Image (tube, coloured by chain):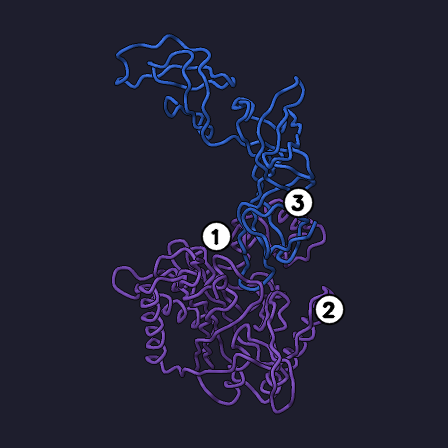
Chain colours: A blue, B purple
Amino acid sequence: MANYSTNEFKAGLKVMLDGDPCAIVENEFVKPGKGQAFNRVKLRNLMTGRVWERTFKSGESLEGADVLDLDMEYLYNDGEMWYFMKTDGSFEQYPVEKKALGDTEKWLKEQVVYTITLWNDNAISVSPPNFIELEVTETDPGLKGDTAQGGSKPATLSSGAVVRVPLFINEGEVLKVDTRSGEYVSRA
Amino acid sequence: MIDDWRPTATIVTLRERARLIAEVRTFFAERGVLEVETPVLGHGGSTDVHLASLSAEATTPAGRERLWLQTSPEFAMKRLLAAGAGPIFQLARCFRDGEVGRRHNLEFTMLEWYRPGLPLAALIEETTDLVRRVLGRESGDDPVPLRRRRYRELFREALGIDPFTVPIETLRRLAAERGGLAMDDAPRDDCLDLLMSLVIEPQLGRGGVEAVVDYPASQAALARRHRDPEDGEWVASRFELYLEGLELANGYDELTDAAEQAARFAEDNATRRAAGLPEVDVDVRLLAALEHGMPAGSGVALGIDRLIQLALGHESVAEVMAFATPRC
């Protein structure tokens, strides 16, 4: 991979830092009146999701990271790995470890398309679509006539996620949920 | 269609900018300081190790030669001083390679002025007056206050160390901690610069103008040096002016000694060679002018784009420039 110098750092650039692939979030050029210039850089570690703040001497460089975001459809789980398939017609499949799946595990549904981040052709993270439709598998019985009150109760969805839903929702209904906030949006 | 043909400043801002620039000219006219214009291109460039100069190939009566784009109008203005110009100011376009960011632009406007015979302390006052004028807070109930801060005192307060005497290992460890980077074999000044930029600078100039004085002698650049009355350590006769965490100006009790100036140029180029940086042609005409004799006095360079940014309440210099670097 190519090397990138601090003056080429911009949001979204993928670089290697301490052995992990990172995405640059923010890059600020700082310089005292007379003297050495530095770049104050925020990077998101793509393995852990954690944001690092590092300072570099201006002109220093980092190795680029071979990182790619691809759309893939979720297929199945064999008890050890989760399998996804490219949507480009190649039918190429990628196994994903639990660690890479992270929180997305609770939003998994077959045939839904997810964004898989590959590093050196290995899946390192999975992002769900912003909105997903899932069936309620378990919740207290719905209360009639309570639609205006705005109360809520927990409901378990087919993927395993638990979300707060209005009191009138019943088991077996399909709901639209925002995966970013984990909030109920509407009936699907 | 791409939309980046548009200015980075609004037309309203550009009108305000023009008004403030006119205010600057009035300020100096009132004080009998002559406006001058000197070349942007010169045979000599800045040897400063921390400045990257741009250069251009030009055809002149001497043939094909390399000319340097100025990083400040200092050398040409000092030649005017040596020729007897008296107090002078200039709004000069300057170029510094690689310096692009919220507070930097590859080319920018420097307001630089020289005051033969004026002590540094008086120039700090005058620079603050100019800042007040541009901010529109000159008199009445709300004049911007000025506070003088010693470089050593700032490090003692913020970090609990004396920047001049602290062991280099302690300094490197502190810089590495604060910056999150390896400083294992970093020179002393790089550690100080890092701590200054990351820890001290952001807190400076809150609630008024702060003038930092008595810099380490190693950071003197083109300023004289004097002994710190506290313990006789050499310090640079220099100041930097801060407002709202922004460095606005850099002033010197000007070096007038030709031999000392030549030695500092040579030292810079030696450091450049050692660091694998390109050497810069020394301005021999400046040295000749100093040899002839330049009146003692003080001078200051002020980043007018930053001051206009603060005066108009903007977040970046790009917002007060017609076309900032990415759109040039």
Q: Judge by depth and name the residue closer to the eye, A84 or A159.
A: A84
Q: Is residue B15 left or right of residue B200?
A: left
Residue pushed farthest front? Answer: A89
Marks 3 & 1 on one chain: no
Secondary structure beneath disc 1? helix
Q: Position of residue B179 (x, y in %)?
A: 60, 47
The chain letter for the residue carrying disc 2 is B
Looking at the image, is mark 2 or mark 1 earlier in the sequence? 1
Q: Position of residue B162 (x, y in %)?
A: 59, 53
Disc 3/disc 2 C-alpha distance (Å): 32 Å
Q: Position of residue B171 (x, y in %)?
A: 65, 51
- Residue B202 disc label: 1
Q: Judge by depth and name the residue closer to the eye, B302 or B22.
A: B22
- Residue B273 disc label: 2
User: Can residue B193 be seen here?
Assistant: no
Q: Residue at x 44, y 15 (%)?
A: A136
Q: What type is the residue that disc 3 sits on?
A: Ala
